[in-house]
């Protein structure tokens, strides 16, 4: 696998977002005794999933991008859903768990 320096440069954004998700997980760990802090897990997942997809896409060739497009799309959509769920839990709204 021959990776150019431009591909490594493109990994800066996903690495920073993964770091942000790690900080949110550390905040949750410090406040996990509070029942309202669970939203931090959802928001961390909302940042982590798209960052993983973006990082993977930065390293893929065009042929690999076409093969893995559906999987990365699921990661992007899952990240958006996790962020929405985290915001609902933070604001005290209705939980989507009631729908399941």
Image (cartoon, rainbow, N blue to C red):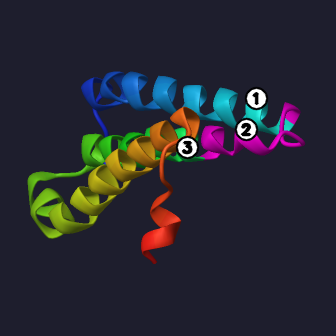
Circle 2 sits on which residue?
A: 37
Circle 3 sits on which residue?
A: 89
Do the numbered discs 2 and 1 sit on residues whose CB atoms are within 8 Å?
yes
Circle 1 sits on which residue?
A: 27
- Residue at left offset 46%, top offset 78%: 100
Of residue 47 and residue 66, the one placed in the foreground of this image is: 47
Secondary structure of the residue carrying tag 1 is helix
Q: CA distance from mark 2 to mark 3?
A: 9 Å
Lower sequence index among marks 2 and 1: 1
Q: Nearer the viewer, mark 1 or mark 3?
A: 3
Secondary structure of the residue carrying tag 3 is helix
Q: CA distance from mark 1 to mark 3?
A: 16 Å
- Residue at left offset 28%, top offset 62%: 74
Lower sequence index among marks 2 and 3: 2
The magenta-colored residue range is 30-41
Residue 20 position in % (x across, y down): 57, 26
Secondary structure of the residue carrying tag 2 is helix
Of residue 29 and residue 20, the one placed in the foreground of this image is: 29
Q: Which mark is residue 60?
A: none
Can residue 52 be seen here? The reply is: no
Q: Nearer the viewer, mark 2 or mark 1?
A: 2
- Residue at left offset 72%, top offset 39%: 36
Residue 25 position in % (x across, y down): 70, 37
- Residue at left offset 84%, top offset 33%: 31
Residue 82 position in % (x across, y down): 44, 49
Identify whether 68 is placed above or below 33.
below
């Amino acid at each position: 696998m021959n990776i150019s320096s431009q591909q490594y440069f493109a990994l800066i954004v996903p690495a920073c977002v993964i770091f942000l998700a790690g900080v949110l997980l550390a905040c949750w760990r410090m406040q996990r005794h509070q029942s309202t802090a669970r939203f931090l897990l959802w928001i961390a997942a909302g940042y982590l999933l798209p960052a993983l997809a973006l990082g993977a896409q930065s390293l893929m060739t065009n042929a690999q991008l076409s093969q893995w497009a559906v999987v990365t799309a699921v990661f992007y959509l899952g990240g958006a859903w996790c962020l929405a769920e985290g915001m609902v839990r933070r604001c005290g709204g209705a939980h989507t768990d009631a729908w399941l």
